[in-house]
Amino acid sequence: MKIVAVTACPTGIAHTYMAADVLTKTAHQLGIQIQVETQGAMGIENLLTPQDIARADIVLIASDIEVEQRGRFTGSKIHCVTIEEVLINPTAVIQRCQEL
């Protein structure tokens, strides 16, 4: 399974990057490929390309705000969660992605 994810929080500092880190670590522990784009105070980092999105089984949006350029994901299977959900139980979030 391959997941592409976007993390974003209102201030775009700590929680955006904490969520990206925990998703990456948890996915690797579960043997799942993941690529995470962050939308934070520094703007968009690790921008997901159209090819990345097309190859993904699911798009995970972990955000407490509206993500930028959301139209890129039209036609993709999308699962939306809050940053808090990712930080509290990243394993459950990734397992829900697998079930969808």
Image (cartoon, grey):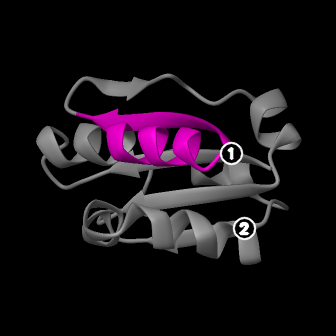
Task: Look at the picture and state if 66 lies above or below 14.
Answer: below
Write the residue at 31% across / 48% down.
19
- Residue indicated by mark 2: 98
Q: Is residue 69 visible?
A: no
The three-letter code of the residue at mark 2 reads Gln
**Residue contact at pointers 2 and 1, CB within 8 angstroms:** yes
The three-letter code of the residue at mark 1 reads Ile
Q: x and y percent of residue 61 in the render? A: 51, 59
Residue 61 shown left or right of residue 11 in the figure: right
Dot 1: what SS? loop
Range shown magenta: 21-40
Res 35 quadrant in image: top right
Magenta stretch: includes residue 39: yes
Task: Look at the picture and state if 51 lies above or below 60.
Answer: above
Residue 44 shown left or right of residue 60 in the figure: left
| Neighbours of disc 2 within 10 Å: few (<14), some (14-19), many (20+) | some
Q: x and y percent of residue 82 in the render? A: 34, 70
Write the residue at 47% across / 38% down.
24
Magenta stretch: includes residue 36: yes
Task: Look at the picture and state if 80 lies above or below 8.
Answer: below
Write the residue at 50% across / 69% down.
93
Task: Look at the picture and state if 67 lies above or below 25.
Answer: below
Write the residue at 12% across / 47% down.
11
In the picture, the quarter occupied by the C terminus is bottom right
Q: Is residue 42 visible?
A: yes
- Residue indicated by mark 1: 32
